[in-house]
Amino acid sequence: MAQKLGIMAGMVAVLLLAVQSVHAQQKELRKIHLNVFRIDSATVAARVNGYFAAEGLEVDITTTPNSTDQMRGVSQGKFDIVSTAFDNVLAWSGKEGAEIIAIAQISDKTVLPVFVRPEIKSWGDLKGKKLAADAVDTAFALVLRRVLLANGLDMTKGDYDLVALGATGARLESMIKGETYAAILTPPFDVKATDAGMRRIGDSKEVLPDYPNTVLAVNREWA
């Protein structure tokens, strides 16, 4: 919890700096629209304990079903700031006219675990199977493809299919139902996956030991 609160304190500082750069002439700061994949305990604590208010901020926090909606939302001005995977920022550079930039790194050297259904005993067993992803060309899907390639599976050769399902909970549900056979599952869904009989087969550190993972990103014009 202490580490999460420290991360949230940093987020508050970044939010404040960003707001001041845009509204330096305003005495009262307007509401900040923050979009995330999951509202964690640190975010709740920051709001309940008045950390945002203490910095003169009113932060409206919403969740996104997938990275495509999130990136399109920040690009079109629906959200001021998003907490997202750095891959999303790279993938959306110039896409649909978007000018999205990362302004802070929230976590680094993150290990992203790959889980499979219980009948999958080796990487080779995934050949010809459908695998779950947020969006097929952004975020953790790119990491998953790198991990699979390192283990002999190449999507460009038709070794498997990626299915865009959105956030982590939806990916796990699809695996439990037997609709897909593997996915990257982050906390707390990694624990839920294990409880449901899924098995951890590998992780991102095999190919991306310094993966930057989560950043705060904004539309360049807003920054």
Image (cartoon, grey):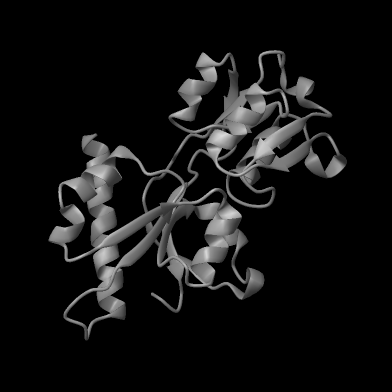
Quarter occupied by the C terminus: bottom left
Q: Is residue 39 visible?
A: yes
Along the line of sight, the residue nearer the viewer: 146 or 56: 56
Residue at horizontal 53%, vertical 70%? 75
Q: Where residue 34 sits in the image (x, y, percent)?
A: 38, 59
Which residue sits furthest left? Answer: 54
Along the line of sight, the residue nearer the viewer: 33 or 131: 33
Q: Where residue 67 sits in the image (x, y, percent)?
A: 56, 53
* Up/down of 220 relative to 47, above or below: below
* Up/down of 104 relative to 209, above or below: below
Residue at horizontal 71%, vertical 26%? 181
Q: Where residue 179 sits in the image (x, y, percent)?
A: 73, 28
In the rendered structure, the answer to whether residue 181 lies left or right of residue 98 reads right
For residue 113, what is the image quadrant?
Answer: top right
Residue at horizontal 62%, vertical 75%? 97
In the rendered structure, the answer to whether residue 211 lies left or right of residue 116 reads left
Q: Where residue 95 sits in the image (x, y, percent)?
A: 64, 69
In the rendered structure, the answer to whether residue 223 lies left or right of residue 11 reads right
Which residue sits furthest right? Answer: 157
